[in-house]
Amino acid sequence: MSQERSWGVRIRKLLGIKLGVLFQTSPESLVLAQQPMRSLPGNGDFPSISIVTPSFQQGQFIGRTIRSVLEQGYPQLEYIVQDSCSDDETAEVVNGFVSPQLKFYSEKDRGQADAINLGFLKSSGEIMCYLNSDDVLMPGTLARVGAFFNSNPDIEVVYGNRLIINEHDLLVGRWVLPGHDATLLRHVDYVPQETLFWRRSLWARAGGFVDDKLAFALDWDLLLRFVNVDARFSHLPDFLGAFRVHEAQKTSSHYAQVGVKEMRQMRSRYAPSLYSRLLMPFRHMCFLLKHIYFDRKILRAVASGK
């Protein structure tokens, strides 16, 4: 980890800020943080959901990702695994699942974003999501998301809170967000990608692609294109997904070389106003203070067993 990022993480930990921090606690059982399975909407009117998982050499984890999706029990699900001709055990693992909801494609691509685009070209669901091949959905997430979209036809994007797990599925952190702030999103991205769902009509309005020229900021770029076409966002105060940290991920040195440059590019493109930049530190501080409050509220609830 670069010295700058290391000091930033230390300061956040001292202040009780968990957003942006991946390793927060000693590993503990994920059972403590799981939510009970939510009932599916009673009227049987489920919006169809398409999930794409881009994959390359993730045989170690992809089985857990697929299981977390199929075990949702969501009736109107289309799940596409778009693999880049992995030569590890990926194909064997995926083919071990027997489900009409699961489709497996193995073909060359130009990277993660291109694989996501290829997968979505094959999809047809009203609601869209992509889930990386080492992350997982929490139980009941699709029922929660489907019911919310059904009940809120004006909302086009939803996302929730994040759990952070290690390679052994043990909990090492939480990101509890205080709500949605579209202005702040132009300067910093705290939206947990594995919890993000949106309407297909919005996808088309925002260009219908994930930018394959980006390696780190592709999620943020998509969100900002949603903002630019006046999408209506909503944050759900539930742990909808878990982000996995492990040694095979993109390295901190790669982030320092490529990621930082892409982040600056996003701010220059989507938040060019000097006035906006001058006000942002205060707005960011208020957002983080609210985060600390809601995070401690969650911790008290977990400690009391509620």
Image (tube, rainbow, N blue to C red):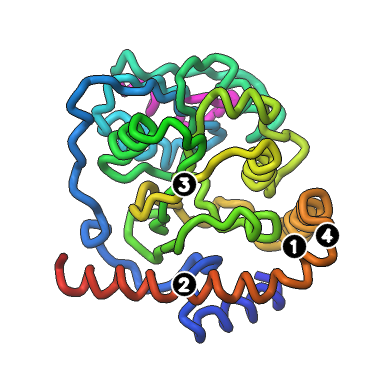
**Residue 74 drawn above or below residue 244:** above
- Of mark 1 and mark 4, the one earlier in the sequence is 1
Image marks 3 and 1: residues in contact by CB distance under 8 Å = no
* Residue picked out by circle 2: 290
Task: Verify whether residue 20 appears in magenta.
Answer: no
Three-letter code for the amino acid on which mark 4 is drawn: Ser
Distance from the alpha carbon under mark 1 to that under mark 2: 29 Å
Q: Which residue is mark 1?
A: 256
Residue denoted by label 4: 273
Residue at image location 71% in from the left, 76% down from the top: 4
Which residue is painted at 71% across and 44% down in the image?
215
| Mark 2 / mark 3, whichever is N-terminal | 3
Image location of residue 296, percent across then percent down: 34, 75
Viewed as shown, does residue 36 lie left or right of 267? Answer: left
Q: Position of residue 93 (x, y in %)?
A: 38, 28
Measured Cα–Cα span from mark 2 to mark 3 = 17 Å
Mark 2 burial class by Cα count in 10 Å: few <14, some 14-19, many 20+: some
Q: Which amino acid type corresponds to the residue marked 1 in the rendered image?
A: Ala
In the image, 218: left or right of 257? left
Q: Observer-nearest residue: 112 or 19?
A: 19
Instruction: Give the residue drawn at x 54%, y 28%.
Output: 87
Quarter holding the C terminus is bottom left
Q: Which residues are drawn in magenta? A: 81-97
Q: Is residue 213 left or right of residue 24?
A: right
- Separation of residues labelled 3 and 4 (CA atoms): 25 Å
In three-dimensional space, the C-alpha distance between marks 3 and 1, rounded to whole angstroms, equals 31 Å
Amino acid carrying mark 2 in the image: Lys
The x and y percentages for residue 206 are: 67, 30
Determine if residue 258 is in view: no
Q: Which mark is residue 171?
A: none
Label 1 environment density (alpha carbons within 10 Å; few <14, some 14–19, many ≥20): some
